[in-house]
Amino acid sequence: MAVKAALLLAAAAWVCLSAAAASAFDEVPTVAFEERFSPLFGDGNLVRSDDDRSVRLLLDRRSGSGFISSDYYLHGFFSASIKLPKDYTAGVVVAFYLSNGDVYEKTHDELDFEFLGSRWGGQWRVQTNVYGNGSTSHGREERYLLPFDPTLEAHRYSVLWAPTHIIFYIDDTPIREVIRHPEMGGDFPAKPMAVYATIWDGSTWATEGGKYKVNYKYAPFASDFSDLAAVGPRADPVLRVPRSAGGDADLQDLLGLMTADYAVMTPQKRAAMRAFRARQMTYTVCYDAVRYASGPFPECDNSDEERDNFSAWGESKTVVMRPRARGRRRGRKAGAGAVARGRSTVASS
């Protein structure tokens, strides 16, 4: 009873937090595409709106598509409202992420939202990744079911990256916090990163370990990005220093970032985060005793109560994806598709 009551209180806090925080997050300045971003690949599969405030990324047999920020950032707050493709989307991957892989091929840093398509129409999953200094071989992945249909309307996905911690948000609700621990060493992202958005063919891994492929009968797959925001000190990716006047100006930028509402984890936010994770998280590396037999990562906020919800390999024993009838019919017809240009990632089950 005590646990149930705590979850109910946390859920109530989440609802109140979303309503209260909306005004604070709405103050984050958004930009036109050409102000901060450039096409990355896909040619005609990247379609900009007439007012240049939104971008549609398409995946078809010919290619996926994507864009990149014009600058690299050393910490900041990065956000986009994203509407995901509808209907059968097995094998499709939509990503909104930070990376410096083009500069540091073997020692890159990365912070990801990866959206993994489904046979069941709107029942997408989202994966968050934290990599530092090329640590993909022992990455810090988590996966969640979304508590809404992300194909019906756009929802906001944000990453706060500070020198001391990282927070992932969905619609103003924090879903994951990574506090920098001394034992993380280079595994905590610390080099300037660019902002990316892509859609691509992840047939080899994205849906049930690659069992279900992209079916181009349902192409083109379209994902819409709007409300683009990139707030933080722009930096030289090689010299790893801000591109500003330096000195007091840099300190002021960092102070502004660290004291912003989105950078401060209040008790109400933490309660909302725990409520989300209790209901929606399907995998966390923190309880993966099979992949990491030596024990959890040092920054993991482990609890016996939460551990009971997960099997030995970090998969949830309580959160279950419920297939839709129409999805089952489409799932049987799914076929393999051509592989479009994308980027490498750690395999997901």
Image: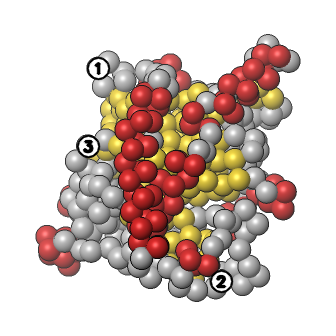
State which tag comes first along the sequence, 3 or 2: 3
| Residue 336 visible, this orientation | yes
Q: How many numbered tags mark residues here? A: 3
Label of residue 289 in the image: 2
* Mark linked to residue 142: none
Give the residue at x 65% y 71%: 302
How far, Cα to Cα, is label 3 from label 1? 20 Å
Where does residue 173 sit, x and y in percent of width and height? 46, 47
Residue 99 location, quadrant: top right
* Marks 1, 2: nearer the viewer: 2
3 or 1: tag closer to the N-terminus: 1
Quadrant of residue 225 within the rendered picture: top left
Residue 137 visible in the snapshot: no
Task: Give the class, few, some or many, for how many residues have Cα within 10 Å of label 1's Cα (few <14, many ≥20).
Answer: few
Q: Earlier in the sequence, mark 1 or mark 2?
A: 1
Amino acid type of the residue tagged 1 in the rendering: Asp
